[in-house]
Image: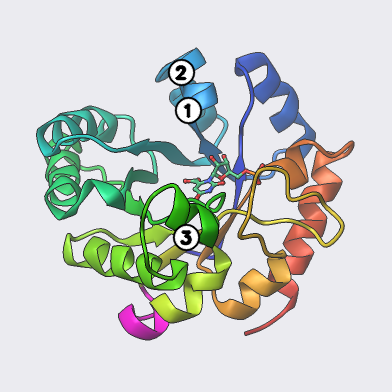
């Protein structure tokens, strides 16, 4: 993966997507389609965005019994997206089933989408981990453990916060993909995110890709905001 900025298209529908993408002057982007958009527009939105020439991370965060995840992934593989994801909390059998489903569903001549596992959401804090999820470990250790499970299950990488990237890369190797949301420019509000970082820090700590939503989509000039994120992300060498 060529260190992309993945723009989270958290919009209501196709009209909003077209208005937004039209601001990018034919630049080929890597975008993320999540639950908000997919549940409104269905699979047709994927072919629509692909026709415009953009790469897609389909972020539906599957988390169910292994057989259900396998069958769901068999269907999703036909959409020919670049990345899909699951929750690592579903366990190793579920993650293995996700890969089996993707392999079974990928049409001949197409490459199977990369599959990555959400470790702990970037909205989760240490206090929430302990008090609500009753996990009595450090966030870093939990994320690293989930990343190891994902690796053992045959996945290509994880979604984690920037703050766990170094530990994962040290233990598993830097070719294991780390996709990091919770990205904010210095003066932006954290909103509902807890484990945030600037694009510069993500670059310094070695994230494979950053996911950026509101710091681009909610700005008055999203294209200008994207260029600023890009400069920050590409400017600082590790
Ligand atoms: O899987 C994800 O993409 C994801 C995982 C996670 O731990 N945290 C997280 O924020 N995300 C997604 O990344 C995007 C972040 O959006 P912003 O907070 O607006 O930049 C949203 O679309 C989330 O659904």
Q: CA distance from mark 3 to mark 1?
A: 18 Å
Against 75, residue 7 (above or below) is: below
Residue 118 included in the magenta stretch of the image: no
Categorize mark 2 by other alpha carbons within 10 Å: few (<14), some (14-19), many (20+): few
Q: Left or right: 180 with respect to 107?
A: right
- Mark 2 Cβ and ligand 1 under 8 Å apart: no
The answer to whether residue 25 is visible is: no
Q: Are marks 2 and 1 in contact (CB under 8 Å)?
A: yes
Label 2 SS: helix
Q: Quadrant of residue 13?
A: top right
Residue 170 included in the magenta stretch of the image: yes
The answer to whether residue 23 is visible is: yes
Which residue is tagged 3?
A: 160
N-terminal of the pair, mark 3 or mark 2, is 2
Picture coordinates of residue 60, whole percent (x, y) = 40, 34
The quarter of the image that holds ligand 1 is top right
Q: What residue span does the magenta drawing correspond to?
A: 169-175
Q: Quadrant of the C terminus?
A: bottom right
Q: Which mark is residue 39?
A: 2
Q: Which mark is residue 35?
A: 1
Picture coordinates of residue 183, whole percent (x, y) = 67, 56
- Mark 3 Cβ and ligand 1 under 8 Å apart: yes
- Mark 1 Cβ and ligand 1 under 8 Å apart: yes
Q: Which mark is residue 126?
A: none
Picture coordinates of residue 25, whole percent (x, y) = 77, 38
Label 1 SS: helix
Label 3 SS: loop
Q: Quadrant of the N terminus?
A: bottom left
Picture coordinates of residue 192, whole percent (x, y) = 66, 43
């Amino acid at each position: 993966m060529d260190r992309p900025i993945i723009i989270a298209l958290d919009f209501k529908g196709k009209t909003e997507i077209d208005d937004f993408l039209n601001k990018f002057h034919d630049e080929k982007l890597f975008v993320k389609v999540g639950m908000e958009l997919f549940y409104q527009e269905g699979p047709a939105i994927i072919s629509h965005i692909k026709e415009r020439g953009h790469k897609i991370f389909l972020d539906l965060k599957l988390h169910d019994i292994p057989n259900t995840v396998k069958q769901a992934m068999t269907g999703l593989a036909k959409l020919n997206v670049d990345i899909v994801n699951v929750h690592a909390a579903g366990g190793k059998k579920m993650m293995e089933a996700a890969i089996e489903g993707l392999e079974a569903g990928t049409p001949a001549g197409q490459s199977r989408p990369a599959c990555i596992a959400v470790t702990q959401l970037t909205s989760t804090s240490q206090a929430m981990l302990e008090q609500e999820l009753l996990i009595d470990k450090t966030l870093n250790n939990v994320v690293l453990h989930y990343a190891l499970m994902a690796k053992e299950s045959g996945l290509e990488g994880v979604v984690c916060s920037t703050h766990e990237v170094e530990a994962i890369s040290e233990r598993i190797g830097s070719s294991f993909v780390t996709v990091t949301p919770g990205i904010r420019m210095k003066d932006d509000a954290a909103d509902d995110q807890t484990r945030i970082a600037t694009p510069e820090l993500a670059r310094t700590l070695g994230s494979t890709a950053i996911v950026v939503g509101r710091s681009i989509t909610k700005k008055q000039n999203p294209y200008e905001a994207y260029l600023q994120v890009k400069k920050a992300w590409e400017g600082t060498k590790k």
